[in-house]
Amino acid sequence: MSDQQNHIERLRKDISELEKSISWYRDTFENRRLLGIVKDRFVRARKKLNKAEGLEGRIADYINNNPLTVRSTRPSHQVSIIMLSFNRVEDTRKAVRSIYKNTSVPFELIILDNNSNDEVRTELKQFTEKYKDLRVILETTNLGCAKGRVKAARYARYDHLLFLDNDIIVSPYYTENLFSLLYSQENVAGVCCKVVFPNGKIQFNGGQMIEDDGYALYSLHDEGQEFDEAATNRYIDCQWIPGGATIWKRTVFEKFGIDEDMKGSFEDNEISYRIRAAGYLLLNSPASIVIHDHFDFKNTIFKKNEAQYYAGRNDQGRIKDALLHFYNKHHLIFSFAWKNNPWDMIWNLHSKDEVLRFIRENNHKL
C-alpha cells in the first residue's frame, strides 16, 4: 500500500472515530461546546479525505510512486516565483496556499496585481502579513500578461524565475524536478510543468512547433491524455513551452526578454522561438505536475462574475495584433494545430493568401 493510500486509510479511521464521538456527545451530554469542537474536527477530516481521494490526492500518490520523481535539489537553488493577479482572488488564495505547502526549495513569491478591485487588493496586502517572503505589487492599470511579467521579474532577487498563473495548484516535488531538468544540460534555458485540468486530462506537457510553407504551427504535447498515462512520463526536447507554469534561468530570460508587443498571451510562443533559434534547449518536466483550475471548468456564477477577465483573454484586437507582430518580426504566420487556426474561425480566413492579404491590410493599424 502506498503512502497516499495509508494516509487515506488513516483519515477514514479518524472520521469513523469522530462520528462515534459526535453520537456519544449528543446522546450523553448537553455540552454544546465540546460537541462543536468534535464536529469541527470531523468537518476538517472530511475535507482532507475529499482532497486525498480527489485529483490532488491521485497526483500526490502518482508522484510518490513515480521512479522518475526527484526529491531533492542543490542547496544553492533558489527561485523567484512570479504570479499575476486580476480579481479572481479565490484562485490566487488556493494557488498561494499550494505554493507554501509544496515548495521546499528556498523561494520568494512576487504577486503583481493588474488593477483588481479594492476588495481583492486589500486581501492581497493581507497575504504579506500571513506568508513569509511574499511581496505584492499593485498596479493602477492593467499591464496585461507580457508587460506584467516583465515588470514583476525586475523585483526578483534570485537567479531563477518561475512563472505560475494564479489558477495553478502545485504538487509535491514540482520544483525539485524542474531544477533537475533545468541543469540536466548546460544549454537548457527553461522547463515547463506537466499541466493538468481539473478532470485529470493533460492540458500540455511541453509544446511543439513545425515550420511549414510560411507557417509556424504550434501544438501541445500529450493534450487530452490522462495525467498518469505511461507514455506521458517522458522528457521531451520542446520547440516551445507555454509560460503559465515554467521556470527559466534568469540570465537567459533577461538576455532574450519577453516581447511586450506580443499581445494576446502569445508571448511564450515568441520568446521560445528566439531562444530555440539561438541554440538553447527547452524541456518539459513530466514529474512536475500542477493542476490548472481553468476558467472553462468554473461554474456559471463564477463565469458571470469574471466576464471582464474572459473578454480580455479573447479580445480579437489583441489576437490580431499578435498575428501581425509575429509575422512582421519572424515572417511566419503562427497557427495552432492546423494552418489558419484560429484565423479561419475568427476572421473567416481559410488560405495562406487570405491571411497574408489580411496582414497587409491591417499592418498600418499596429
Image: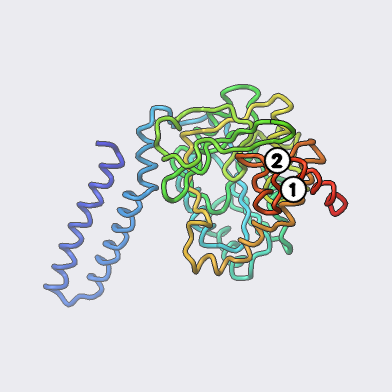
Residue 258 appears at what percent x and percent y? 73, 42
Secondary structure beneath label 1: helix
Circle 2: residue type: Phe
Residue 11 appears at what percent x and percent y? 25, 51
- Residue occupying the point 37% across, 35% down: 64
Which quadrant would residue 153 be assigned to in this image?
A: top right
Marks 1 and 2 in Cβ contact (< 8 Å) = yes
How many numbered discs? Answer: 2
Q: Residues within 10 Å of mark 1 (few under 14, many from 20)?
A: many
Residue 100 seen by the camera: no
Earlier along the polypeptide chain: callout 1 or callout 2?
1
- The residue lying toward the viewer, choosing from 334 and 146, is 334
Which residue lies under the disc numbered 1?
322
- Residue occupying the point 74% across, 26% down: 278
In the picture, the disc for residue 88 is: none
Secondary structure beneath label 2: strand
Residue 327 falls left or right of residue 253: right
- Extreme-right residue of the structure: 364
- Extreme-top residue of the structure: 185
Which residue lies under the disc numbered 2?
334
The N terminus - image quarter: top left
Residue 310 seen by the camera: yes
Residue 95 falls left or right of residue 263: left
Q: Residues within 10 Å of mark 2 (few under 14, many from 20)?
A: many
- The residue lying toward the viewer, choosing from 205 and 49, is 205
Residue 329 appears at what percent x and percent y? 81, 38
Circle 1: residue type: Ala
Residue 4 appears at what percent x and percent y? 31, 42
